[in-house]
Amino acid sequence: MLARILDLPVFLIFVILACSAMFIPAIHALTQEEFHVARSFFYSGLLGLILCALIGIAMSGRATHNTALEHLLALLAVFVILPVVLAVPFYEALRTTSFVNAYFEMVSSLTTTGATMFPNPSRLPSSLHLWRGIVGWSGGLLMWIAAAAILAPLNLGGFEVTTSAEPGQGGLRRVDMRAASPGQRLIRTTKRLFPIYAGLTLTLWLCLIIAGNTPLNGLMHAMATLSTSGISAIGGIEESTVGVPGEVLVFLFLLFALSRLTFSTDTITGRTRGLHEDAEFRIGLMLVVGVPMLLFMRHWLASFEVNEEENLRQALKALWGGMFTVLSFLTTTGFVSSEWEAAQGWSGLATPGMILMGLALMGGGVATTAGGVKLLRVFTLYLNGLREMQKLIHPSSVSGKGAHNRRVRRQGAYTAWIFFMLFALSLALVTLALTGFGASFSQALVMSVAALSTTGPLLDVAGAEPILLTDLSAAAKLCFAAATILGRLETLAIIALLTPELWRK
């Protein structure tokens, strides 16, 4: 039975998993005596599984084409078409919104963006919040798996700047990719990564409950942390009762989004020496410490007056609020610390939206759940700039990458620069499109950064006033949703789909 399911098209396998997951909020709604919500999820899941069974029977015996194009198309279909399936029970259960809004909500959750059409959490039943969290958590797991099973063999998603893209380095992985069917390869990677992903989520959930969170809120924040979706049932972790102890727990688990080496070495070629020599992790820690320290020091540089008796306590609050929020937006999670207002008051920056937008654009680690440009690409461009400055002084000098930078390929700066230009072009085009649909320039810019970096909470904190997505037209909502898919898959993957060579393989 399992072997036959694995022989089905990859997209159909994901639909089966999505329909099976609908029974979880159905059971939760039943325990909460929300019978209409329970029926909506139960019937949607049951009907979906029946349709998948009929399609599977009709396709039985047909040979599946095991090509690189099929893998990328399946991943694209998951982010574009699967949210239609996921939105059906959401739309039927809520009954007070349009299907476009429900589709947008599912796209935002599945891409781990976390932007919501429902800024007032009390409007949604708890089971619908749980469904949003499950979809976001599943989207994060999908990116963990797809990075190793789909993107790495094709040298996409950040791997184009690593040594695995060097000739001869990724050959074994590509042979393995063609030898196994898509379902077999995905299940093989899932067996390795799912226990880690689920175990980390369960551990954080239990720790948050011990810290004082309710079971539902603790689960939502645990899933939002590991998936970097920032989805919450109460409007963010700053609204919970756990305070700083809970934020410390979330802070520690957000470190997994700085580098894939924190949880796996399945996409790394050669011998690794630990996190202390990993460029992404070191840069991430430097930013987490450096940016809050600059905000902290600005208090004295700008000569702000604070009561001397409260200096130490206020300083510690400001420092922690800055560190947590910086790491949260660097990993594109978007949680705001409960002490972030203290950090703003200490530094004197009323609207530090540009800082948060810059952190989100930089993003987290390659092959993690974080979005953005990715730290490894930024590090590659930094190395290239440093080398060019050295050549200004010694034009004939010859230099290697060094023992600590062997993860970066020889042409890494060239490919990183191409991606950066494509990202900037995408940012300009999405901003132009959103302004054409009626948004102001400042709002369109914030929305474009939030979508392409998959950091939805930027809509609430980056500007002077929160941006309400409900005020947008249907066309603008769909444009924003398309931008989140582009930000999650990245421009190079879309271009690869249009490459004629892939169609011939």
Image: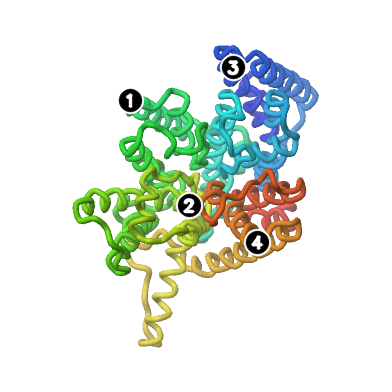
Residue at the far right in the pictured view: 58
Q: Are marks 3 and 1 in contact (CB under 8 Å)?
A: no
Is residue 67 shown left or right of residue 29?
right
Marked residue nearer the N-terminal end (4 or 3): 3
Residue underneath mark 1: 210
Q: Nearer the viewer, mark 1 or mark 4?
A: 1
Mark 3 lies on a secondary structure that is helix
Task: Tell me the kind of residue under disc 3.
Answer: Ala
Residue 282 appears anywhere in the view? no
Mark 3 / mark 2, whichever is N-terminal: 3
- Give me the residue at 67% from left, 54% from top: 494
Question: Disc 3 marks which residue?
Answer: 29
Q: Which residue is mark 2?
A: 366
Q: Looking at the image, do the residues carrying marks 1 and 4 touch, with CB atoms under 8 Å apart?
A: no
Q: CA distance from mark 1 to mark 4?
A: 44 Å
Q: Which residue is mark 4?
A: 426
Pointer 1 or 4: first along the chain: 1
Q: Which amino acid type is marked by label 1? A: Ile
Quadrant of the frame with the N terminus: top right
Image height of 134 relative to 455, above or below: above
